[in-house]
């Protein structure tokens, strides 16, 4: 089910900067106040997802494989914490695909409702297994 929410062009521009420029590690996306468009909230080298609000994020995960080779996987997060309002969770879930489809080059998808599901070790394990 689609919510009819669109993706602002800035989201695509900043995603390309993360993929190609490597100037920062994270991008956090949110809905605008009218809940009609997905916008870039911020980009940085670290992130804190809110405990009671839904967000989407992209992370440039760097890690070493067992053979010693370095790898990067662009990781997409859907963050719908247990503490978020039910209506916000529904809008986030129905709007997710619009953003996810617009960001070409995602290697890993993570859906999280609590910190353990988006913890570095959890994401790293999934990346190493190739999921």
Image (tube, rainbow, N blue to C red):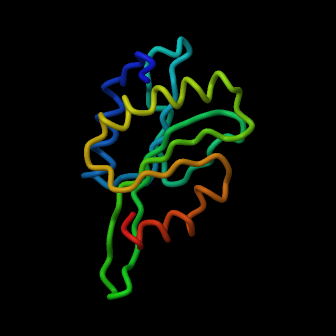
Compared with 120, 29 (above or below) is: above
| Extreme residue toward the right, this view | 83
Q: Is residue 86 left or right of residue 42?
A: right
Q: Report the label total.
A: 0
Q: Could you tell me which residue is drawn at 46 percent across and 14 percent down?
A: 36
| Extreme residue toward the bottom, this view | 67
- x and y percentages locating residue 116 in the rendered image: 66, 59
- x and y percentages locating residue 9 in the rendered image: 30, 25
Q: Is residue 102 left or right of residue 54?
A: left
Q: Is residue 115 left or right of residue 64?
A: right
| Extreme residue toward the front, this view | 1
Residue situated in front as seen by the camera: 37 or 101: 101
- x and y percentages locating residue 80 in the rendered image: 61, 39
Q: Could you tell me which residue is drawn at 67 percent across and 54 percent down?
A: 115
Compared with 76, 90 (above or below) is: above
Q: Could you tell me which residue is drawn at 33 percent across and 56 percent down?
A: 107
Q: Could you tell me which residue is drawn at 49 percent across and 52 percent down?
A: 110
- Looking at the rendered image, the quarter that the C terminus falls into is bottom left
- x and y percentages locating residue 1 in the rendered image: 43, 24
Q: Quadrant of residue 82?
A: top right
Q: Quadrant of residue 13?
A: top left
Compared with 11, 116 (above or below) is: below
């Amino acid at each position: 089910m689609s919510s009819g929410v669109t993706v602002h062009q800035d989201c695509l521009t900043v995603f390309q900067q993360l993929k190609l420029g490597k100037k920062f590690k994270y991008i956090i996306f949110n809905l605008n106040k009218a809940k009609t468009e997905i916008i870039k909230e911020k980009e940085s080298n670290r992130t804190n997802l809110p405990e009671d609000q839904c967000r989407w994020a992209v992370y440039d995960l760097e890690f070493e494989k067992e053979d010693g080779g370095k790898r990067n996987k662009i990781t997409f997060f859907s963050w719908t914490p247990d503490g978020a309002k039910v209506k916000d969770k529904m809008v986030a879930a129905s709007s997710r695909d619009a953003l996810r489809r617009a960001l070409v080059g995602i290697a890993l998808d993570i859906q999280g409702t609590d910190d353990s599901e988006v913890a570095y070790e959890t994401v790293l394990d999934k990346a190493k297994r190739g999921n």
